Image: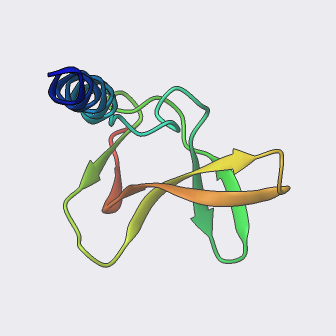
Amino acid sequence: MRKIKAIMLSIAVIATVGAALATNSKAPCSSLPQFYKSGNNFYPAGTENYDYVCEFNHFGTCTYYYDAATNTYKPCKSGRILWLR
């Protein structure tokens, strides 16, 4: 009986942790400043839905964010950047 109880408790803990991770799947870069790439240079993109929007595009990258740990720009949102202003 104790084995069954321990197994059920383990399954409940794993399911809870999995559900918590699944609901928090928002991109970690969304709260960071966004940049766009032009040639080999990166420039501040501004505010999404005010200065630009990301149009659906499977093969492109709309915005990037700066990763200070690796000193590189990494893709954040996929799509194509369209300027509003």
Residue 55: quarter of image: bottom left
Q: Where's the C terminus, which quadrant?
A: top left
Q: Is residue 6 above or below residue 67?
A: above
Q: Residue furthest front?
A: 1
Residue 49, image x, y percentages: 31, 31
Colouring convention used in this rendered image of the protein: rainbow
Residue 67, image x, y percentages: 73, 48
Residue 40, image x, y percentages: 72, 76
Residue at the image position 82 percent from the left and 44 percent from the top: 68
Q: Where's the N terminus, which quadrant?
A: top left
Residue 34: quarter of image: top right
Residue at the image position 33 percent from the left and 63 percent from the top: 80
Residue at the image position 29 percent from the left and 23 percent from the top: 13
Q: Is residue 4 left or right of residue 9?
A: left
In the image shown, does 51 or 14 lie closer to the viewer? 14
Q: How many numbered marks, from 0 up?
A: 0
Q: Is residue 60 left or right of residue 43?
A: left
In the image shown, does 56 or 44 lie closer to the viewer? 56
Residue 41, image x, y percentages: 74, 67
Residue 23: quarter of image: top left
Residue at the image position 61 percent from the left and 33 percent from the top: 33
In the image shown, does 67 or 23 lie closer to the viewer? 23
